[in-house]
């Protein structure tokens, strides 16, 4: 039986373990280009997952496959254990494309009514959902203005609202904050946080690594058509770069020799040290530097982050 919006209340354990979306050994080839090579991962019910990959990694093909827009050569995509291609199952999915999919010559309300009807909403339910959406995106007072007159951030908010009018159980967002100002970006994520709190599973693709760090429960990284790493950020760091902090130091004075634990980095033109516990180890390092005639004028402590993990795994910047 396909889960509906009126599913019965489940225990916390059942909600945590239920798979909302599963990509299962998906292969896709375009001519001689093997875009996907046995890609597999899953999204739990109520989970926020960030899907990352450098350009050319196969992410676009993967997103289109997850939406049901293209059929894989082999493998499958399941939404609540049912094939994504089934029309009734697709109603449980919301898709927010990177390119704006609203009509500039329609008002905000008209756009929402149009997309609501496409999702099967009618009469009172359509009106209620449109009213809710306008309030949710903070544009009730601009409901009768043409969207062509809206700012980029306002258009993005309408675009997102059009994709969630039917209350999807799973929401796929492809670069939802591209081209918007910081204030609009924050407003969009406040909106998504509200959906998450209501139990919506969210899959986010983004070129902003800070968004992936702060707005996801788990991260999947794809490259060359395959999943090369997945897990919580702490797990990814532990399994790749390691958890040591890197201390870079500007040292004056003529040191007899670099003390134990301190090394010179030609590329950075500064001294470096790696520490597990900053509070315990850094004072000892500073004492050793002073003991050989050095004086630390400035220092910076760098904690491993998603950017370090991504470079370690792919050898590329996210936007390359």
Image (cartoon, rainbow, N blue to C red):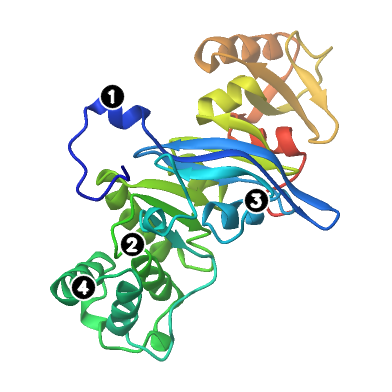
Callout 2: few (<14), some (14-19), or many (20+) C-alpha neighbours within 10 Å? many
Who comes first in sequence, dot 2 or dot 3? 3
- Residue at the location (60% across, 29% down)? 304
Number of marks in picture: 4
Residue picked out by circle 3: 72
Who comes first in sequence, dot 1 or dot 4? 1
Q: Is mark 2 on a helix, strand or loop?
A: loop
Who comes first in sequence, dot 3 or dot 4? 3
Distance of mark 1 from mark 2, alpha carbons? Answer: 26 Å
Residue picked out by circle 2: 164
In x, y percent, where is residue 30? Answer: 78, 57
Q: What element carries label 1?
A: helix
**Quarter assignment of residue 190:** bottom left
In x, y percent, where is residue 87? Answer: 41, 59
In x, y percent, where is residue 85? Answer: 49, 55
Residue picked out by circle 1: 13
Residue 126's label in the rendered image is 4
């Amino acid at each position: 039986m396909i889960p509906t919006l009126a599913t019965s209340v489940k225990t916390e354990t059942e909600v945590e373990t239920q798979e909302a979306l599963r990509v299962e050994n998906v292969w896709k080839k375009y001519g001689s280009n093997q875009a996907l090579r046995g890609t597999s991962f899953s999204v739990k019910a109520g989970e926020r997952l960030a899907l990352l990959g450098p350009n050319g990694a196969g992410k676009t093909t993967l997103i289109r496959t997850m939406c049901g827009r293209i059929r894989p050569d082999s493998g499958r995509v399941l939404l609540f254990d049912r094939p994504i291609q089934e029309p009734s199952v697709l109603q449980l999915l919301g898709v927010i494309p990177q390119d704006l999919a609203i009509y500039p010559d329609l008002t905000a309300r008209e756009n929402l009514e149009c997309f609501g009807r496409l999702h099967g909403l009618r009469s009172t339910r359509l009106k209620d959902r449109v009213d809710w959406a306008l309030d949710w995106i903070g544009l009730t007072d601009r409901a009768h203005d043409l969207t062509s007159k809206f700012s980029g951030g306002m258009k993005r908010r309408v675009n997102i609202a059009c994709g969630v009018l039917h209350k999807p159980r799973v929401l796929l967002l492809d670069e939802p904050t591209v081209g918007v100002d910081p204030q609009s970006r924050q407003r969009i994520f406040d909106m998504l946080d509200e959906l998450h709190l209501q139990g919506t599973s969210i899959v986010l693709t983004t070129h902003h690594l800070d968004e992936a760090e702060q707005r996801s429960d788990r991260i999947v990284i794809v490259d060359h058509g395959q999943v090369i790493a997945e897990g919580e950020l702490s797990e990814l760091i532990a399994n790749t770069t390691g958890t040591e902090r890197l201390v870079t130091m500007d040292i004056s004075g003529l040191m007899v020799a670099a003390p134990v634990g301190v090394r010179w980095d030609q590329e950075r033109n500064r001294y470096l040290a790696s520490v597990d516990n900053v509070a315990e180890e850094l004072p000892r390092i500073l004492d050793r530097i002073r003991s050989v005639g050095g004086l630390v004028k400035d220092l910076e402590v760098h904690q491993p982050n998603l950017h370090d993990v991504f470079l370690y795994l792919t050898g590329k910047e996210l936007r390359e």
